[in-house]
Amino acid sequence: MRSFIAGRRATTAHEEHDVEAPAVTIRQGIARRVTAQDVAIRQGGALQITGGTVRLSQGGIGIAMAEKATLEQAAAQAVIARDTAVLDQAAAGVVLARQAQVRQSAIGILVANEVKGDGLRVLISVRSAFAFGAGLGFAAALLRLLRRR
């Protein structure tokens, strides 16, 4: 049974799941670590992806580190994009990018210079994280003052 194709060489499901190639395409399969300039995953997943361009459709990943990352109907724990992160009907725990283009997606923590899109749900943005930290600092200082009395 073929689980993923790395460049030109097909790798079977029982072989090692660390893939390093110029281009990697995974269809209905999984990999532990993928390192490639161009990574495309459809109905599959990977724990860690490092690449120039990462495209994930109908799958899941642990962490993606790329120049540009695109998630369509997918989920990720963390997306770190040097340039652009594009999420379309996706969910992510943490997104760090220069620019985030988001449509109908949910993100736990979003840190981006520029955010475009609609239907975006962010649990903690940079502004709310600062507000939370300030409130927590104020509460800690107040407790310290009360303890001294």
Image: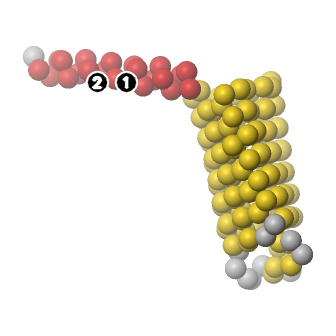
Q: Say whether residue 83 is left or right of residue 139.
A: right
Q: Does residue 16 appear in the picture of this structure?
A: yes
- In the image, 23 versus 47, the foreground residue is 23
Quadrant location, the C terminus: top left
Q: Name the amino acid, label 1.
A: Leu
Neighbour tally class for label 1: few under 14, some 14-19, many 20 plus, Cα within 10 Å: few
Q: For this rendering, which residue is in front, 35 or 44? A: 35
The circle drawn on residue 140 is 2
Total numbered badges shown on the rendered structure: 2
Residue 7 at what x, y percent from top left? 86, 71
Q: Is residue 5 above or below residue 102?
A: below
The residue drawn where x is 55% and y is 21% is 127
Q: Quadrant of residue 91?
A: top right
Circle 2 packing at 10 Å, graded few (<14), some (14-19), many (20+), is: few
Residue 138 percent location from the top left of the image:
33, 18
Cα–Cα gap, marks 2 and 1: 6 Å
Residue 118 x, y percent position in the rendering: 80, 24
Callout 2 touching callout 1 (CB < 8 Å): yes
The residue singled out by tag 1 in the image is 136
**Snapshot quadrant of residue 117:** top right
